[in-house]
Image (spheres, rainbow, N blue to C red):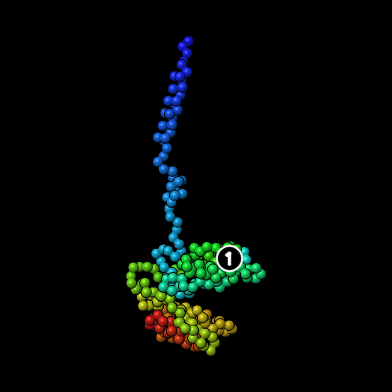
């Protein structure tokens, strides 16, 4: 029997190995989808709360309270020119150690909200629950402010829509204060942010204010009729409504 030469076997084995490597290299994909995503190939994240086609409306708006392990957190914003000019916590955890945590964290969160112009603010160290609740209520406030802003239709007048609060009018039974939304030179919404309350005033207010709100929108002025049985409330409403109209430029 003829024996194979050792050197020849070694040469054949080496050639087979090289061929295998070349074949594997030719089959390797040009790019790794997982690596591309990690390097930024994934779709961009959603826009921040301040972004989007609809800006936030001017005025003062209070977010819904966010419940945390140590108590509720509720944020109120003041918006002017489509920007947050002031942020404050009207509710925050209190009692015991919470007092110290709140006094340290809330001012920082307020400042961060104004600087970020969104709910994308960093949590304060040592106040994880308070920070999370603050951000949740802040987002709620921003959502409400955006909902009150006019839709961008591309028209110049739509951009002039504004929300204005009149001066509080003092009546025999308590103050009345009216807030209106004006768009394209017309009152599109009217509401009483203050009205007499307590005892019989509750019933009178609940009956009169919706009628006055509707009348203000329909009339487009403060020249509206008083509601029967609510003379003082009606007079205060008209006075504050006129104040709001004056602030809105008539």
State the image quarter where residue 220 is shown.
Answer: bottom left
Q: Is residue 179 left or right of residue 90?
A: left
Q: Residue at x 41, y 66 (%)?
A: 54
**Mark 1, residues whose alpha carbon is within 10 Å: few (<14), some, or many (≥20)?**
many
- Please state the horizontal and vertical placement of residue 113, each as a whole percent of the image: 49, 68
Q: Which residue is mark 1?
A: 130
Vertically, is 11 above or below 21?
above
- Please state the horizontal and vertical placement of residue 71, each as a whole percent of the image: 61, 67
- Please state the horizontal and vertical placement of residue 248, each as a whole percent of the image: 40, 80
Q: Is residue 74 left or right of residue 186?
A: right
Q: What secondary structure is marked by label 1?
A: helix
- Outermost residue toward the front in this view: 7
Q: Residue at x 58, y 82 (%)?
A: 198
Q: Residue at x 45, y 46 (%)?
A: 35
Kindly tell me whether residue 8 is visible in this rendering.
Answer: yes
- Please state the horizontal and vertical placement of residue 59, each as a whole percent of the image: 45, 75
- Outermost residue toward the bottom in this view: 172
Q: Residue at x 52, y 62 (%)?
A: 122
158 or 138: nearer the viewer: 138
Quadrant containing the C terminus in the rendered view: bottom left
Kindly tell me whether residue 66 is visible in this rendering.
Answer: no
Vertically, is 8 above or below 139?
above
26 or 160: nearer the viewer: 26
222 or 250: nearer the viewer: 250
């Amino acid at each position: 029997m003829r024996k194979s030469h050792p050197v020849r076997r070694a040469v054949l084995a080496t050639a087979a190995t090289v061929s295998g490597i070349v074949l594997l290299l030719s089959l390797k994909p040009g790019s790794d989808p997982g690596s591309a995503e990690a390097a930024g190939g994934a779709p961009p994240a959603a826009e921040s709360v301040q972004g989007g086609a609809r800006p936030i409306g001017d005025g003062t708006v209070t977010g819904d309270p966010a419940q945390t392990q140590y108590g509720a957190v509720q944020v109120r914003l003041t918006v002017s020119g489509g920007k947050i000019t002031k942020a404050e916590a009207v509710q925050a955890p209190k009692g015991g150690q919470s007092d110290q945590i709140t006094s340290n964290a809330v001012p920082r969160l307020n400042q961060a909200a104004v600087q970020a112009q969104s709910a994308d603010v960093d949590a304060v160290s040592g106040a994880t629950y308070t920070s999370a609740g603050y951000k949740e209520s802040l987002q709620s406030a921003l959502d409400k402010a955006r909902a009150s802003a006019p839709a961008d239709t591309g028209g110049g007048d739509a951009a002039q829509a504004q929300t204005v609060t009149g001066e509080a009018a003092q009546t025999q039974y308590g103050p009345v204060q009216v807030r209106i939304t004006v768009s394209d030179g017309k009152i599109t919404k009217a509401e009483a942010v203050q009205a007499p309350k307590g005892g019989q005033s509750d019933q009178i207010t609940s009956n009169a204010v919706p009628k006055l709100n509707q009348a203000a929108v329909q009339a487009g002025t403060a020249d509206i009729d008083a509601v029967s049985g609510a003379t003082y409330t009606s007079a205060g409403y008209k006075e504050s409504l006129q104040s709001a109209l004056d602030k809105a430029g008539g």
